[in-house]
Image (spheres, rainbow, N blue to C red):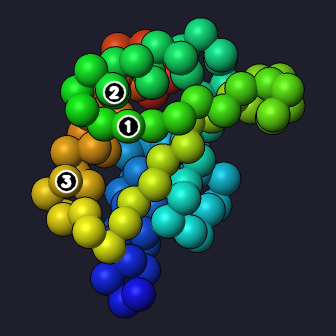
């Protein structure tokens, strides 16, 4: 449990430091707010092409303009794997205009 909490804390703080909106999540299952449905679907596709599994959450499951990506970190993830995922998310988000450089 300690490793899970450390990984989740690191994951969330690093995502937020990179400019992602995680709705102040404090769990290992973290949302990344995208807003635009098409961009969320494209981010999902591009991340999966990089070997990273994420799930888009679209209306009507969430309110319009609050489309998000659901991410999960586990105790089994290394810090290198977490960093790789975050770097991949940032690269994709910048290319789609979700994050600014």
In the rendered view, would you say 90 is above or below 2? above
Image coords of residue 4 (percent x, y):
38, 77
* Badge nearest the viewer, 1 or 2: 1
Q: Which residue is mark 1?
A: 53
Q: How many numbered tags mark residues here? A: 3
Residue at 34% across / 18% down in the picture? Answer: 46
Q: Quadrant of residue 66?
A: top right
Q: Which residue is mark 2?
A: 47
Which is nearer the N-term, disc 1 or disc 2? Answer: 2
User: Could you say whether the residue bearing mark 1 is in a helix, strand or loop?
Assistant: loop
Identify the mark at residue 93; answer none if there is no mark. none
Considering the image in quadrants, where does the C terminus appear? Answer: top left
Q: Are marks 3 and 2 in contact (CB under 8 Å)?
A: no
Q: Is residue 32 left or right of residue 87?
A: right
Q: Which residue is mark 3?
A: 81
Q: Residue furthest left?
A: 80
Mark 1 neighbour class, 10 Å CA radius: few under 14, some 14 to 19, many 20 or more = some
Q: Nearer the viewer, residue 2 or 20?
A: 2
Q: Is residue 92 left or right of residue 50?
A: right
User: Could you say whether the residue bearing mark 3 is in a helix, strand or loop?
Assistant: helix
In the rendered view, would you say 64 is above or below 68? above
Which is nearer the N-term, disc 3 or disc 2? Answer: 2
Residue at 45% across / 24% down in the picture? Answer: 44
Which is nearer the N-term, disc 1 or disc 3? Answer: 1
């Amino acid at each position: 449990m300690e490793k899970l909490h450390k990984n989740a804390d690191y994951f969330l703080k690093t995502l937020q430091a990179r400019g992602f909106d995680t709705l102040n999540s404090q769990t290992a299952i973290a949302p990344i707010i995208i807003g635009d449905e098409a961009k969320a679907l494209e981010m999902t596709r591009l991340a999966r092409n990089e070997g990273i599994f994420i799930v888009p959450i679209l209306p009507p499951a969430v309110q319009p303009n609050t489309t998000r990506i659901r991410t999960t970190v586990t105790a089994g993830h290394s810090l290198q794997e977490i960093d790789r995922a975050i770097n991949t998310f940032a690269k994709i988000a910048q290319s789609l205009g979700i994050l600014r450089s």
